[in-house]
Image (cartoon, helix red, strand yellow):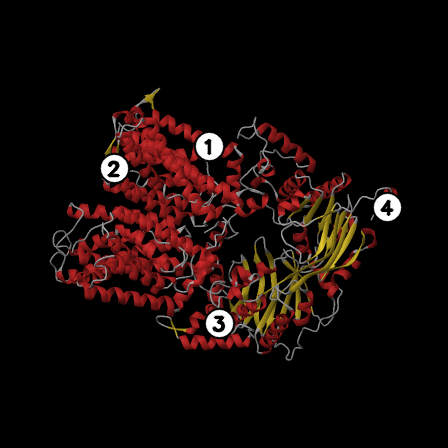
């Protein structure tokens, strides 16, 4: 559903004044930050061990893979598309890399394979969406199934335990900050730079705002759209590498639900599902940190782990609701 | 067009159009248009809606292909297949609906496909970009930082950015389509100053507008388009507002319109009392009586379509009352349909028909409640088929007897008949129509007029919104004219005052 | 986003009711190439196992016709099953061993499915949120809730000892078959013969035109999701009965099949087009395909991959057909 249909469906009224609309929009946009501060305060008061350096470091490490995947997802969401296959691509890449690592291949090569798998998967997605004209969610949903099936086939549904060398990346730190967090930050910075300072990035925003007008003005919309899926795939591969280096093993459920975390992080951070709006920095990164902080908080107060999917769902739902309301109020 | 001064090597005219023709689905919209524009000349193009201005400009701008005729730009043959071709040849079209991206800055909008880059890398050189953008803005006299997001600009400022974008691509001819409709007085002056400066620098322009005073003042020459052909052309000094209006309307009366048999009753069936919707229509008050056909004339932007949406409940009105047969109308479309109201919208493809559904399904769509039986809402196949077939015959759906075919395959005229049939099946007390014969061939038009007249004769009240003055004069008992959101006049066409009607529709400054 | 068209449109548009041809072709191909495929036992097994899928896909048909998608259906099955167990199970249910347990259980299960549908329907229909995100999220919530509830009540993820009467519904092939086919027939009637069905299609084809023509788009859209939830409840009743356990895992592996069956069966992803009988044939095709691949001793993941490809091809053809 595009923005115009959305407004028709909601019987958009002229009655709210300009100023009211803008204020509400800004309020809605600030919600995640407010939520972050709130969570930290409430839990911090309850549990002393929460607002500590250890917790912060832990959150950064846990958030790192999500941040990387979410950066790629942000690119896709800016075009009003979605990539539901990122988790599956991570899984396939991890399975392949796991086998190679166990067979004695050097770490760097195995890592390269993961990213390559992500790029290949992203390329397939891009063909499905731009050349065959499929709706992004259908194409990437089908790829999700194919990917998970392929991953399970590769890993023969058994866990693969990786050699020690692999864990070095996940366990090491530099200047007190985990290496994976540095890598994630670099990816986030690179992503934001591409979005704000390259012609490709600016054309991406134009396409998200009005694809038809972008085409008329001479933007190669097919190429731009294809590129975002490849970026998303590459980020999935890299994110998988970071996750793998922390877990040290590939289980049959590796990568599951990463797509939701990525979408949630992006939407919480201000990226709209309807396209044209959103930033990697500070938006998506903040969204990912918020998400992981909430979960860390839940662990800290020893909440029932069976509540986690419920809370995740509630957060995503709220993020999407806020996005819908904010888009409705936009000019 | 060359004068004695340049007799040595006469410069070819900047733009030449010869015998341009274009039809849509059998309806001729341009019947051989001849236009010439010299270098550094501003040509004013005037004509009623439906005279063919947009089609002509779309052809010149590369969005449409002509069926026949030739075009030359600076002496070379010009056959654009896309807007890019036209842009490359120097034709820059500044549309009424602007195509800027509000979420990007001015500089980014100007340079979206030609960003200056740093040292061969992928990064945008912001310093150079800002400087280039500032130069472009200076050329059009817009004093805003190039880093301003377009969403913060006023309509007038956005228009200047559009013009700047056109100039950036080395435009030789600037087409300005109704450039002043969303501008305040000072912005309008600024625009006109800019056009004058550009003209001195050698740029040609086509200025399309209903603000006839502006056209007379700012243009070198004027061409009047009527019914798809240029009926008058000459230097601006040779025209006056009166003569322009006369050229725009004067035509032979076509024998399309059936004579009215019965005269309207005195019983009001639809009443609007001081109906207002903020920003759109203001203080609308009028009455439609049983069996009466009331026409609403006006130019685009006058608020006519918006009024029909308010009457039908698609948009809420902020104050005032709408009464159907004496009782106030409330709620959305489905409630108003149940009370006996019907609306044929302006754009049948957009919201009049489900194009992929069958003719029969479309015909039955508004009557599903009455055709089905409670409590489960089961439709009786034979009853529905019979009703649908009957209504198809009533509206004289020609050619395709196959009611199961998707409605997308029908001609424009037949599609419109399906829309009418859909509403007739609901047996409305009041039928509101917005541009009922747009894009329809003469034969189907005549049939639709007959249909409307029969409806009125049987007691239905009709409200017809149209840009076709001739059509309204042919079928209406009374014509209201809207301008800028309110009603500027009410006319009985017994006095054939076409010119008065057009003046009532034109911007207040002209009338 | 405009895509370069491939010459598939000609191929897809030419065939009338391609699903019928596809089913026949598949049947013949599998009978010929696979030993034991066409045996009475195997065929009846296929049909019986396909009944819950038939119900889910039928419910999904309504949602697809409205122009949306319901990705929560299979998770709702799990939630409904757990809800039933919480009422009826002799181990941990509220009405354990009570005479009214089966009926109360049935009621609660149906109500749960409808409630999920109402939530989805309100968000998509009234609030106009994107259907795939909303239903994905609701599905996640429902799945998580099911696991939480079953763990709280029974300490494990499965509840046993369900009343005989209840189990008889899903467990007796004849009864299950009657329930499923009855529901499918009723659904076909609703979609094809009632004003609601026509309104739903109109919303799927052109929601703006539907609104102008007096259709209450929000309500009609919401109704489709309520129906999907209701049919998910029926599927849960069958699954819970035939497996004789209440568990959040029932239905989880079926989401891929649900989407596949509806798309293959001719229900367009963009709305408007679709028939229940087409969906039923799509279910039949997928059931035969799954069975054939299992008989060929292919592992589960290969089957998943194949089904993923089938959806892809079906979606591509559907898209080409729409533009042909």
Residue B281 picture location, percent across and down = 60, 57
- B224 left or right of C239? right
Labelled pair 4, 3 in contact (Cβ < 8 Å):
no
Residues C227 and C48: in front is C48
Identify the mark at residue A251; answer none if there is no mark: 2
The numbered mark at residue B403 is 3
Report the Cα–Cα distance between label 1 and label 2: 32 Å
Q: Residue at x 25, y 59 (%)?
A: C50
- Which type of secondary structure does the marked residue at label 1 adopt? helix
Asked whether, in this view, residue B142 is left or right of residue B349, the answer is right
Of circles 1 and 4, the one toward us is 4
Q: Are marks 4 and 2 in contact (CB under 8 Å)?
A: no
User: x, y (%) of residue B165?
Assistant: 64, 40
Residue designated by label 4:
B3
Label 4: which secondary element: loop
The residue positioned 21% from the left and 52% from the top of the image is C82
């Amino acid at each position: 559903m595009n923005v115009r249909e959305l407004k028709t469906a909601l019987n958009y009224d002229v009655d709210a004044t300009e100023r009211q609309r803008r204020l509400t929009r800004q309020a809605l946009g600030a919600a995640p930050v407010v939520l972050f501060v709130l969570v930290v305060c409430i839990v911090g008061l309850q549990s002393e061990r929460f607002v500590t350096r250890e917790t912060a470091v832990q959150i950064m490490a846990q958030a790192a893979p999500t941040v990387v995947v979410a950066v790629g997802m942000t690119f896709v969401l800016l075009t009003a598309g979605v990539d539901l296959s990122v988790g599956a691509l991570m899984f396939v890449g991890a399975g392949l890399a796991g086998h190679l690592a166990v067979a004695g291949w050097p770490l760097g090569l195995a890592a390269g394979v993961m990213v390559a798998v992500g790029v290949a998967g992203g390329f397939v997605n891009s063909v499905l969406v731009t050349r065959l004209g499929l709706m992004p969610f259908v194409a990437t949903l089908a790829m999700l199934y194919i990917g998970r099936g392929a991953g399970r086939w590769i890993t023969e549904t058994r866990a693969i335990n990786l050699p020690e060398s692999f864990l070095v990346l996940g366990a090491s730190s530099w200047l007190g900050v985990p290496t994976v967090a540095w890598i994630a930050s670099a990816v986030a910075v690179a992503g934001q730079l591409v979005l704000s300072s390259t012609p490709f990035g600016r054309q991406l925003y134009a396409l998200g705002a009005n694809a038809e007008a972008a085409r008329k003005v001479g933007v190669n919309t097919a190429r731009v759209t294809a590129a975002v899926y490849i970026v998303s795939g590459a980020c999935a591969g890299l994110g998988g590498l970071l996750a793998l280096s922390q877990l040290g093993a590939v289980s049959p459920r590796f990568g599951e639900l990463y797509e939701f975390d990525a979408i949630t992080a992006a939407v919480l951070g201000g990226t709209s599902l309807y396209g044209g709006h959103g930033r990697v920095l500070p938006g998506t990164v903040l969204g990912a940190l918020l998400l992981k902080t909430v979960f860390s908080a839940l662990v800290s107060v020893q909440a029932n782990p069976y509540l986690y999917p419920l809370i995740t769902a509630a957060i995503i739902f709220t993020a999407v609701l806020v996005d819908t309301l904010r888009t409705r109020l936009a000019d | 067009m060359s004068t004695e001064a340049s007799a040595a090597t006469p410069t070819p005219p900047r733009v030449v159009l010869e015998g341009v023709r274009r039809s849509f689905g059998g309806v001729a919209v341009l019947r051989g248009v001849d236009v010439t524009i010299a270098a550094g000349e501003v040509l004013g193009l005037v004509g009623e809606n439906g005279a063919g201005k947009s089609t002509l400009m779309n052809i010149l701008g590369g969005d449409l292909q002509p069926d026949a005729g030739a075009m030359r730009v600076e002496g070379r043959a010009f056959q654009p297949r896309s807007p890019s071709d036209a842009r490359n040849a120097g034709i820059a079209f500044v549309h009424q609906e602007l195509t800027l991206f509000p979420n990007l800055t001015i500089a980014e909008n100007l340079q979206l496909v030609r960003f200056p880059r740093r040292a061969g890398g992928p990064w945008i050189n912001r310093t150079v970009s800002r400087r280039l953008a500032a130069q472009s803005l200076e050329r059009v006299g817009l004093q805003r930082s190039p880093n301003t997001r377009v969403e913060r600009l006023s309509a007038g400022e956005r228009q200047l950015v559009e013009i700047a974008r056109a100039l950036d691509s080395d435009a030789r001819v600037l087409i300005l389509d109704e450039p002043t409709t969303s501008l305040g007085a000072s912005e309008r002056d600024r625009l006109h100053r800019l056009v004058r400066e550009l003209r001195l620098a050698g740029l040609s322009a086509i200025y399309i507008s209903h603000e006839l005073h502006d056209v007379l003042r700012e243009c070198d020459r004027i061409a009047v388009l009527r019914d798809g052909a240029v009926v008058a052309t000459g230097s601006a000094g040779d025209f006056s507002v009166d003569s322009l209006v006369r050229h725009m309307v004067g035509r032979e009366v076509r024998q399309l319109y059936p004579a009215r048999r019965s005269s309207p009753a005195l019983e009001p069936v639809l009443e609007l009392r001081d109906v207002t919707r903020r920003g759109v229509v203001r203080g609308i008050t009028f009455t439609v009586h049983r069996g009466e056909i009331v026409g609403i004339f006006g130019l685009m932007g006058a608020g006519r379509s918006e009024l029909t949406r308010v009457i039908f409940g698609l948009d809420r009105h902020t104050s005032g009352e709408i009464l159907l047969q004496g009782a106030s109308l409330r709620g959305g479309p489905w409630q108003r349909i149940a009370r006996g109201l019907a609306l044929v919208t302006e754009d049948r493809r957009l919201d009049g028909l489900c194009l992929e559904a069958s003719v029969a399904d479309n015909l039955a769509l508004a009557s599903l409640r009455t055709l089905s039986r409670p409590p489960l809402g089961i439709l009786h196949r034979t009853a529905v088929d019979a009703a649908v077939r009957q209504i198809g015959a009533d509206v004289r759906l020609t050619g395709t007897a196959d009611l199961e075919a998707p409605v997308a395959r029908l001609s424009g005229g037949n599609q419109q008949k399906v829309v009418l049939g859909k509403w007739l099946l609901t047996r409305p007390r009041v039928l509101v129509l917005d541009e009922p014969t747009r894009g329809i061939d003469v034969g189907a038009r005549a049939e639709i007029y007959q249909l409307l007249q029969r409806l009125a004769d049987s007691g239905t009240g009709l409200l017809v919104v149209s840009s076709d003055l001739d059509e309204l004069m042919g079928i209406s008992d009374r014509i209201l004219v809207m301008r800028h959101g309110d009603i500027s006049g009410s006319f009985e066409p017994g006095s054939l005052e076409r010119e008065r009607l057009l003046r009532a529709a034109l911007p207040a400054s002209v009338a | 986003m405009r895509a370069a068209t491939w010459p598939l449109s000609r191929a897809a548009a030419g065939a009338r009711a391609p699903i019928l041809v596809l089913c026949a072709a598949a049947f013949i191909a599998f009978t010929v190439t696979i030993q034991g495929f066409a045996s009475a036992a195997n065929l009846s097994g296929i049909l019986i196992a396909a009944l819950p899928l038939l119900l889910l896909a039928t419910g999904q048909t309504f949602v697809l016709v409205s122009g949306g998608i319901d990705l929560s259906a299979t998770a709702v099955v799990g939630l409904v099953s757990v809800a039933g167990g919480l009422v009826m199970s002799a181990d941990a249910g509220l009405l354990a061993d009570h005479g009214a347990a089966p009926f109360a259980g049935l009621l609660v299960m149906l109500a749960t499915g409808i409630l999920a549908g109402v939530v989805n329907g309100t968000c998509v229909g009234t609030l106009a949120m994107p259907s795939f995100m909303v239903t994905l999220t609701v599905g996640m919530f429902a799945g998580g809730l099911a696991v939480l509830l079953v763990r709280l009540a029974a300490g494990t993820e499965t509840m046993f000892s369900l009343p005989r009467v209840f189990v008889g519904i899903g467990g007796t092939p004849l009864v299950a078959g009657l329930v499923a086919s009855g529901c499918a027939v009723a659904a076909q009637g609703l979609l094809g013969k009632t004003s609601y069905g026509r309104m739903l299609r109109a919303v799927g084809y052109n929601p703006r035109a539907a609104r102008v023509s007096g259709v209450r788009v929000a309500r009609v859209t919401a109704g489709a999701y309520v129906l999907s939830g209701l049919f998910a409840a029926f599927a849960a009743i069958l699954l819970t009965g035939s497996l004789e356990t209440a568990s959040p895992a029932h239905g989880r592996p079926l989401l891929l099949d649900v989407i596949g069956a509806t798309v293959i069966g001719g229900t367009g992803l963009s709305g408007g087009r679709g028939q229940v009988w087409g969906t039923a044939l799509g279910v039949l095709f997928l059931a035969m395909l799954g069975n054939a691949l299992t008989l060929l001793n292919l592992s589960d993941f290969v089957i998943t991959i194949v089904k993923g490809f089938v959806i892809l091809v079906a979606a591509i053809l559907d898209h080409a057909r729409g533009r042909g």
